Image: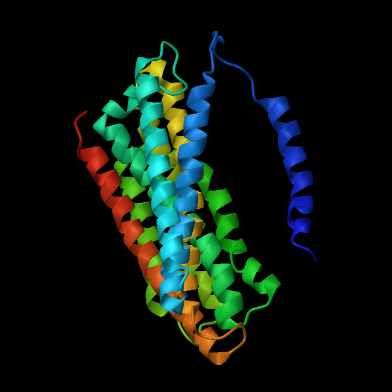
Amino acid sequence: MPWRWIFVILLPFLFVSLVCGLKTIHQVTPTEEAHINPLHVLCLAVGFVCFVFALDRGGSAVTAVSNGDTSATTQCVIAVVLLLIAMAALLVFAWVSHRAFSPLVRLTVLRSVKFRWHLLAYVLLQFVTIGYGYMIPNASQLGFGASVLAAGVVLLPGALLGAASAPVSGSLLDKFGPVRPMFTAMIVGLLGTVLIAAFIGAGSSMVMFGLWYFVYMLGFSMCFANTMTCGMAVPPPELKADGNALFNTFQQLSGAVATTVMAVFLGVAQAGHGSARDAEFVTATQSGAHWGFVFLAVVMVCAILANLCAFASKR
């Protein structure tokens, strides 16, 4: 089946989602006049796009070095140039927003230390989940001999658990407050990442992949939405929309970065080790996946520390 069918199959689900949204989502607060400055949108678009492409080119440069490719220098220069453009665009956005009467996003919401820590934790949690969403299916196929169907289905139990547990996490937050439920969930999520990093290797079955991912998703689903809830409780009412915009924007950016970084782990490991189905290539893929999983476990630790700093912060 051609890869375009992935998007064709998704269309009915998007349509159902649209209909449900139109029927159930209502405007509960009065609307107000707002102006969108095209320069703000342009700076954000250029900044984020160049940043993601800079990571991609940087990964290509590292892969080229591992493979002894002479294009490594060119790729590195392109990555640096793109990164500088991204930084310049985002700095211009911040400067223009500070001076604008009606900015696209009021960055004053970031003055709260507690909000910044919760935002960072949220971004890191998203990074880990999208990282697994990329790495597990690819490693399953290229390093562990799974079929396309098995590589996708291995994520299904964890994904279903995540969807079912999210409402429960809100109830626990209301009943016990944020600290105990969230940190219990994050420790469970960390356990899942450690189990994946420690026990997934040559000879691992898809059942083991699915089981450890299930453990991770149990923890993730119970703390991810609550992290945003706690973060959004910090800004005053007039900055709620700006805080929500930052959470959603960085969630998408984090997913793009996670995919790129995990691809780099696989690409660097596979460089110079033959082609798919070669024994050397399979071993290299398993090694790249292992170090990718270790990296995701480290990111999970950072997410826990970020939420810990958020709760410890007084402002």
Relative placement, left or right, of 208 versus 185 is: right
Please report the residue visible at 41 percent of the width from the left and 57 percent of the height from the top.
77
> Extreme bottom residue here?
279
Tell me if residue 168 can be seen. no
Task: Give 51 or 238, whichever is nearer the viewer.
Answer: 51
How many discs mark residues in the rendered view? 0
Please report the residue visible at 63 percent of the width from the left and 71 percent of the height from the top.
151
Please report the residue visible at 78 percent of the width from the left and 57 percent of the height from the top.
5
Tell me if residue 314 can be seen. yes
Relative to 243, does residue 283 appear above or below in the rendering?
A: below
In the rendered view, how is the structure colored? Answer: rainbow
> How far from the left and from the top, in percent, is residue 270?
50, 78
Task: Give 190 or 50, whichever is nearer the viewer.
Answer: 50
Relative placement, left or right, of 70 versus 134 is: left
> How far from the left and from the top, in percent, is residue 146?
63, 79
Relative to 35, does residue 172 appear above or below in the rendering?
A: below
Relative to 138, does residue 281 appear above or below in the rendering?
A: below
> How far from the left and from the top, in percent, is residue 288?
44, 75
Kindly indicate the quadrant of the structure image that contains residue 197: bottom left
Kindly indicate the quadrant of the structure image that contains residue 102: top left
Please report the residue visible at 74 percent of the width from the left and 61 percent of the height from the top.
3
Quadrant including the N terminus: bottom right
Task: Give 214 or 252, whichever is nearer the viewer.
Answer: 252
Quadrant including the C terminus: top left
Relative to 279, does residue 26 appear above or below in the rendering?
A: above
Task: Give 85 or 218, whichever is nearer the viewer.
Answer: 85
